[in-house]
Image: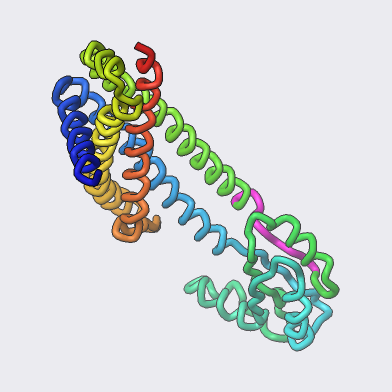
Amino acid sequence: MKKNRTSSIGYFLKEGLRNIFLHGFMSFAAVSVIVVCLIITGTTALVSYNIDLNIVKLQNESEIVIYIDETYTTQEARALQKTVMQVDNVAEAEFEDKNKALEDYRKDLGENADLLDGFDETNNPLRDAFHITMKDPSKVSATKIALSGVDGVANAVANEEVVARLLQIQHMFQAIAVTLVVALGLISIFIISNTVKLAMLARRREISIQKMVGATNWFIRWPFVIEGLSLGIVAGAIAFGLEWALYEQLTDFILGNLPQFTMAGFEDLMYYVIAIFGGAGVIVGVGGSSLTIRRFMDV
């Protein structure tokens, strides 16, 4: 029994690989198309992932600044920190002493520091403030309104438009990535399906004879499933190697032109890419071959 099973597996593998070389050009075309599709979708997904990283970074760097009522002393203003921290979505509240802020401003002006002559601790035009870091930057508007309602807060300032724009860009790239994955995945399945179709047409008479002598549908199907599976795995492996090289070049180009942009190292993403490319290759290969097999079994 075990020997028969081993013999059957050997037969399936041999026939599946033979089908690949039987129509070499179509097999090459199928692998090439899948590789191109995987690289396009993979690159888009990786770029989208890195854009997400940078958007999150920028969102985390975005803050709300609240200015304390000028009637409050610095000590009273600092005492508001506990109340501010209790506001929903506030992660951190860093106090800025107005006198220190005046000195910092004076240093920033450099040679023009004399513009601030006449201002000191007794007539400081600035106000004590808190720099607020949010837990969820997308809730900037609601957080700003909540902070404005705290007793002692004279004004709350936040660049809401920048945060909203960043979120729009993030959603746009996510939508593009998903659309490409679906569209190119369907194209790959179509190509695999036609490759297997040619193999089945070439062996249609043989399949008819097998069925007449009692061969089960699965006995007939397995070589074609293995053909599609093999094409998908080979394409996934080639695409992975090319994607690695392309990503390294893309990283060098982006960082060379946008040094402030952060790119994740491919080594950190490698196992995810292997899993996705391998899984996509298997799904596309087996899916494409299965669709064709089902149509040709009634012979």
Q: Quadrant of the N terminus?
A: top left
**The quadrant where residue 146 appears:** bottom right
**Residue at horizontal 57%, vertical 74%?**
105
In the rendered image of this protein, does residue 74 appear above or below residue 226? Answer: below
**Residue at horizontal 41%, vertical 44%?**
45
The residue nearer to you, when weighing 7 against 298, is 7
The extreme bottom residue here reads 75
**Residue at horizontal 34%, vertical 60%?**
268
The residue nearer to you, when weighing 108 against 98, is 98
Report whether residue 137 is seen. yes
**Render colour scheme:** rainbow
Q: Position of residue 154 (x, y in %)?
A: 80, 69
**The quadrant where residue 124 appears:** bottom right
Q: Position of residue 198 (x, y in %)?
A: 25, 16
Numbered circles on residues, count: 0
The residue nearer to you, when weighing 243 against 143, is 243
The residue nearer to you, when weighing 89 against 144, is 89
The extreme front residue here reads 1
Image position of 127 (left or right of 260)? right
Residue 217 included in the magenta stretch of the image: no
Range drawn in magenta: 154-162
Q: Quadrant of the C terminus?
A: top left
Q: Position of residue 273 (x, y in %)?
A: 34, 50
**Residue at horizontal 66%, vertical 82%?**
97
Report whether residue 242 is seen. no
Image position of 101 (left or right of 81)? left
Q: Position of residue 169 (x, y in %)?
A: 53, 43
**The quadrant where residue 37 appears:** top left
